[in-house]
């Protein structure tokens, strides 16, 4: 089968090659899936660079999420059929014509959901929904997050609104403000403006901000802490700045704030199946009801993998880049 593989860690456009690999056989607890569309996520690119929490053994086939059709079923698997349309995430080797996945990581996709939506339904939206629950914000409360123009940030705001939670999306460019507002996201603030914190305070009024999600690190972490209400929670789920969180200990003490880390992939893998089905069912319904939209930047053939993962395509993209197989 055709696959996008790498023999060493490095820049994705340098180390990825189209390789003829053996078609994998499913273990007793797995299914084999014939790929239709696969997503290219930031964590996939970080994994290829060797900088992610999980390091695959090399050589490795890239990719962690895809939509496809079940092609073969392991001897211990129940509840699936050959030919069934499914999505899988937090798995490995999806940038290939076929991949195997544990049955517990595979979920049926309704016919009404288009391929482009289904191919990215789980990883980032599920991370956003798990993050929303991890923050433990209730309807009517306020949450704030930075780097909000990423896939998780966009979906977080949509899902929060659908659940009745107020959210403020922080971005760093004026054009990103408009892009989020075009998606129906109400409260968006540009942190490049000198009065951005005052803008946030005007939005919430006298209400406290109960939770904050930080994917930047560095001084941005302290900015979120400064806006957090008493007894609020600050969650780190990324470090895009490459810098440690800079936090004022006096604010931590006198606000009695809680600081926690959130790793979506591990949470997803360790979540019990019933709970995960509950969340994915919610995502499916939100997508079908158009309460959640997942923009597409481009769709590339697998043969064009080097272009698809290039900085030119990945930087400044307005939606997900998908691979067609």
Image (spheres, rainbow, N blue to C red):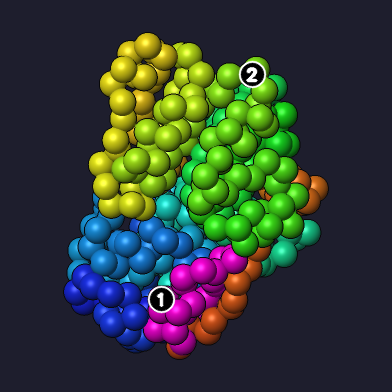
Q: From the top left corner, tell me how far across and down residue 154 is, in percent.
A: 60, 50
User: Any mark on residue 207, and which?
Assistant: 2
User: Does 36 sit above or below residue 173?
Assistant: below
Q: Say what secondary structure mark 1 lies in.
A: helix
Q: Residue at x 39, y 83 (%)?
A: 306
Left or right for 205, reference 255: right
Name above or below for residue 300 compared with residue 127: below
Q: Is residue 195 left or right of residue 95?
A: right
Q: What residue is rendered at 24% in x and 58% in y? A: 51
Residue 91 figure quarter = bottom left
In the image, the segment drawn in magenta is 304-325
Label 1 crowd (10 A; few <14 / some 14-19 / many >=20): some
Within 10 Å of the Cα at label 2, are there few (<14), some (14-19), or many (20+) other Cα atoms?
A: few
Location of residue 219 in the rendering, given as x and y in whole percent from the top left corner: 34, 41
Residue 307 covered by magenta stretch = yes
Q: Nearer the viewer, mark 1 or mark 2?
A: 2
Q: Image check: 73 left or right of 141?
A: left
Task: Check residue 311 in the rendering and tell me which mark sits there, or answer none.
Answer: 1
Residue 269 vertical position relative to residue 304 in the rendered view, above or below = above
Q: Earlier in the sequence, mark 1 or mark 2?
A: 2
């Amino acid at each position: 089968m055709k696959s996008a593989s790498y023999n060493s860690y490095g820049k994705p456009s340098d180390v990825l090659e189209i390789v003829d690999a053996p078609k994998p056989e499913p273990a007793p607890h797995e299914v084999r899936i014939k790929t239709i569309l696969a997503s290219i996520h930031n964590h996939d690119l970080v994994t290829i660079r060797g900088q992610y929490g999980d390091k695959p053994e090399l050589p490795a086939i890239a990719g962690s999420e895809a939509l496809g059709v079940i092609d073969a079923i392991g001897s211990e698997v129940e509840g699936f059929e050959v030919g069934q349309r499914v999505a899988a995430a937090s798995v490995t080797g999806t940038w290939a014509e076929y991949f195997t996945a544990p049955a517990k990581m595979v979920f049926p996709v309704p016919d009404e959901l288009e391929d482009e939506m289904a191919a990215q339904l789980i990883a980032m939206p599920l991370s956003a929904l798990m993050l929303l629950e991890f923050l433990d914000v209730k309807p009517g409360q306020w949450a704030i997050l930075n780097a909000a123009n990423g896939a998780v940030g966009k979906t977080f705001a949509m899902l929060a609104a659908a659940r009745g939670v107020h959210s403020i999306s922080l971005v760093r460019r004026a054009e990103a403000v408009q892009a989020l507002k075009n998606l129906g996201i109400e409260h968006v603030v540009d942190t490049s403006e000198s009065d951005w914190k005052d803008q946030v305070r005007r939005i919430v009024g006298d209400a406290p901000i109960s939770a904050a999600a930080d994917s930047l690190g560095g001084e941005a972490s302290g900015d979120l802490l400064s806006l957090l209400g008493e007894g609020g929670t600050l969650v780190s789920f990324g470090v895009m700045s490459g810098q440690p969180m800079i936090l004022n200990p006096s604010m931590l003490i006198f606000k009695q704030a809680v600081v926690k880390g959130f790793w979506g992939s591990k949470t997803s893998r360790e979540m019990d199946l019933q709970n995960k089905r509950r969340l994915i069912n919610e995502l499916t319904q939100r997508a079908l009801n158009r309460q959640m939209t997942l923009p597409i930047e481009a769709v590339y053939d697998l043969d064009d993998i080097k272009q698809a993962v290039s900085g030119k395509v990945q930087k400044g993209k307005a939606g997900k880049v998908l691979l067609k197989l």
